[in-house]
Image (tube, rainbow, N blue to C red):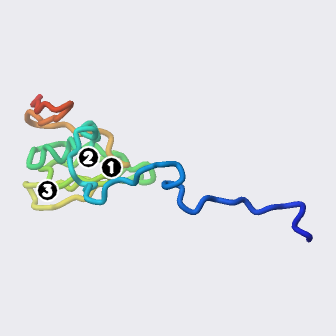
Amino acid sequence: MNGNFYQNPAFPSNQYEENNYTSPPSNVSSMSLDYGEQSYIENILRLNKGRKVNAYVSFPDSKEWQDKVFTGLIEEAGKDHLIIKDVTNGNWYLIRIIYLNYVEFMEPINYLYKYSDKSY
């Protein structure tokens, strides 16, 4: 073809410079507890490491494990997972947050919101 019917789209080589956008600082850690992110579930779970919980989980593709409750101490929490240690049998559970319905705390929880440290 002669190139008159279709032209390839032209994209700017550096969109941030041309639109005067600034890139995020390189020293920002994705694991830091930023005050603007305190309401995210993984940050709330992270603030309560060591607390005893019941984690109610649903696995929709499994008939045997469709609804399950994991009881233990919160060891770690990330954007997509929760690690619980069962102190009764010594087992550790890695639970994907996508399957987590809710968490029941057996003691008051720490919840940091809008620059104040609150315990409920």
Q: Give the residue at mark 3.
A: 85
Q: Position of residue 41 (x, y in %)?
A: 27, 42
Do the residues bearing badges 3 and 2 touch, measured as CB atoms within 8 Å? no
Q: For label 1, count other residues whose C-alpha is less than 10 Å away and answer few (under 14), some (14-19) or many (20+).
A: some
The disc labelled 2 sits on which kind of residue? Glu
Residue at mark 1:
97
Instruction: Sort mark 2 into few (<14), some (14-19) or many (20+) by Cα contacts within 10 Å.
Output: many
What is the number of callouts on the image?
3
Q: Earlier in the sequence, mark 2 or mark 1?
A: 2
Rounded to the nearest angstrom, the CA distance separating label 3 from label 2 is: 17 Å
Q: Residue at x 8, y 54 (%)?
A: 88
Q: Earlier in the sequence, mark 3 or mark 1?
A: 3
Q: Residue at x 8, y 33 (%)?
A: 108
- Tell whether 46 sits left or right of 13: left
The C terminus: image quadrant: top left
Residue that numbered label 2 is attached to: 42
Asked if the residue at tag 1 contacts the one at tag 2, i.e. Cβ–Cβ closer than 8 Å, the answer is yes
Q: Amino acid at mark 1?
A: Ile
Q: Secondary structure at mark 2?
A: helix
Camera-side mark, 2 or 1: 2
Residue at horizontal 10%, vertical 44%? Answer: 52
* Distance between mark 2 and mark 1 Cα atoms: 9 Å
Give the answer, above or below, for where 23 lies relative to 52. Answer: below
State the SS at label 1: helix
Q: Residues within 10 Å of mark 3 (few under 14, many from 20)?
A: many
Instruction: Name the kind of residue labelled 3 in the image.
Output: Lys
The percent coordinates of residue 106 (x first, y second) are: 10, 37
Residue 73: x %, y % from top left: 12, 50
Mark 3 or mark 1, whichever is nearer to me:
1
Q: Which quarter of the rendered picture does the N terminus lie within?
A: bottom right
Tell me the mark number nearer the camera, choosing from 3 and 2.
Answer: 2
